[in-house]
Image: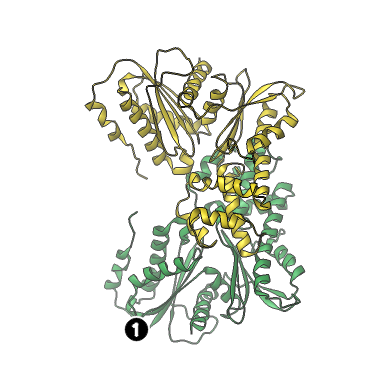
Chain colours: A yellow, B green
Amino acid sequence: MQRHTGRDMWDAEECQSPRMGSVILGVDGGASNTVCVCIPAAMPFNDPLPVLSRTVAGCSNHNSVGEDRARETLERVMSQALLKARRRRSNVCAVCLAVAGVNHPIDQQRMLDWLREIFPSHVKLFVENDAVAALASGTMGKLHGCVLIAGTGTIAYGFTSDGREARAAGAGPVLGDWGSGYGISAQAMTAVVRAYDGRGPETVLTNNILDFLGLASPDELIGWTYEDQSWARIADLLPVVVESAESGDEVANKILHNSVGELASSVKAVVQRLELGGEDGKHPFPLVMVGKVLEANKRWDIGKEVIDCVTKHYPGAYPIHPKEKILLTRGSKICAVYMAICLKST
Amino acid sequence: MQRHTGRDMWDAEECQSPRMGSVILGVDGGASNTVCVCIPAAMPFNDPLPVLSRTVAGCSNHNSVGEDRARETLERVMSQALLKARRRRSNVCAVCLAVAGVNHPIDQQRMLDWLREIFPSHVKLFVENDAVAALASGTMGKLHGCVLIAGTGTIAYGFTSDGREARAAGAGPVLGDWGSGYGISAQAMTAVVRAYDGRGPETVLTNNILDFLGLASPDELIGWTYEDQSWARIADLLPVVVESAESGDEVANKILHNSVGELASSVKAVVQRLELGGEDGKHPFPLVMVGKVLEANKRWDIGKEVIDCVTKHYPGAYPIHPKEKILLTRGSKICAVYMAICLKST
């Protein structure tokens, strides 16, 4: 496989008259999209932060789109963020990547080696799973407690105050992340196929999903599915499943209830291993909730059901929903993790 | 995407001194491998058949490997079979493709158009799902009864004597073919991840699968899985799951029992829709069983369990296991379907 370096992305650097001042690049990469912010290196860590520029691209999880495409996306958001902030790579003093799909020290090292080809040796480099950024975004940079991400993918990640960490799920659709947006959507499509061929009960998901995708018959679903297997494309069916459940459909309701069980089980596994609830399970700890599956704000509120399920076992868990939709807070999520990682690494 | 036509595969035709006589090409393409046989057009349909040549290649299911790679594989087995038989395309009077992934009239038409670019207009072309070939291989060409394929993928397909047909499953792993070799293996890997992160019970699958793959830790499974998502590669774990179940592991046993339920449910859905068991459900009909999941011949005999499950509802179902492993009989499977399709189309 030919390695796509995308080095030509940096050509534009030469054409601009740069501003002065060191900057930090913070990247938050998930299975649906990737955000990069460029912030001044010397600044008070206030909220809101003085974000110099912000750029967005698609998925950068190498397990979903492959390594070449993931790196191309990361390199593009970083080069565009610098260009927009009128800075060059020589202005960068640190890069913090928080990316879904970084599951193993090997993934981390590969990413660091690749970043080092782009940025000179004095630039500090940090690479973490995006769940670390998500946790820090809810705790204003402190790595303590548990975060649950449920967007296109899902992962639960936790830290104790003394630096121990644990995770559950985050292994992608082949390895059973059933509570995720992808998982819910794939199960809904499966229910349509099963109803059609006689293995499962009738469901309004059939009409609702076919309408949404503009398909005429359930047997067209197979072709649609394998035409492009990006996880995000399949996860986009989530609102259709929630609406179908809200209309009273039993099959859709069962899928969402299963999803709640799966997501709560990920959180509980992390909390138990790290003993975040203390010996009696009742100690308080933050439970940061991130991702479109948990932010539905519909009558069928998956996030609320997950919290109910977790607090039955761990009544000290207090949910935090980071204000994801505010641009600068979104920026601060990445800066927060930068701070957190710097603290962790010193 | 650039279309790979692979027309250079046919260059060798020019260099050979061909034998005389019209031939038929029969291709049986699954998610693991693709077999092509070249047989004389004018011959008695005996068993064994006078197969002139037989060639084998990898997966030709376009949903698994993409359209370009699937077509390249099909074109390669056909050109090599002709070369080996010392025939040219001008000797071919009919081509019969029975390929997994042909799920919709659109798939069929695309394949026919593509074959027409390779073979001139007088050559008869037939394209069907590979389940049709599998059924015919068990019934000596007669399209009546039900076939269950469970190899890398799974599908149940049935025909009534008056030509009505129905299918269940065969929608690939995203759409819930859980009884397949892929489905069983993916669930086993999921069980390993769940045991590792605390969501599921301990299982010997962990040691057995890591040993088999040469991995040191369960968190390396994620990287291994997404490195190459060909369905056949994952389905190769099937023997490890069967051995683990035979050693008494509860998790592995549960996965295999689920698989039996899924496979039996596919068969029952087809039998019910076609009323193959008659009004009282007791009429006799052939149930052809094909694929490595059903041929395990171990103490844990998935095929036998499926038959037990089906015959509880449909006592008239009589199982047939085509002698897959005999070269010429394998050849005759394809000829059988050629005959069956010709009969159907006249």
* Residue A274 visible: yes
Q: Quadrant of residue B205?
A: top right
The amino acid type, in three-letter code, at marker 1 is Met
A242 and B244: which is toward the camera: A242
Q: Around disc 1, counting alpha carbons within 10 Å, would you say few (fewer than 14), some (14 to 19), or many (20 or more)?
A: few
Residue A230 lies, in percent from the top left, at: 47, 47
Residue B92 lies, in percent from the top left, at: 37, 79
Q: Is residue A176 left or right of residue A114?
A: right
Q: Is residue B53 left or right of residue A137?
A: left
Q: What residue is drawn where x is 48% and y is 57%? A: A214
In this view, A325 is above or below B55: above
Quarter of the rendering occupied by the N terminus of chain A? top left
Output the chain of dot 1.
B
Count all numbered tags in the image, as a single digit.
1
Q: What residue is drawn where x is 72% and y is 30%? A: A311
In this view, B179 is above or below A116: below
* Residue B181 visible: no
In this view, B77 is above or below A172: below
Q: What residue is drawn where x is 50% and y is 30%? A: A325
Q: Which residue is mark 1?
A: B20
Residue A323 lies, in percent from the top left, at: 53, 26
Q: Is residue A276 left or right of residue B223?
A: right
Q: Quadrant of residue A96?
A: top left
B49 and B158: which is toward the camera: B158
Residue B154 lies, in percent from the top left, at: 59, 61
Secondary structure at numbered mark 1: loop
Q: Is residue B35 left or right of residue A79?
A: right
A38 and B180: which is toward the camera: A38
Q: Residue furthest left?
A: A15
A2 and B177: which is toward the camera: B177
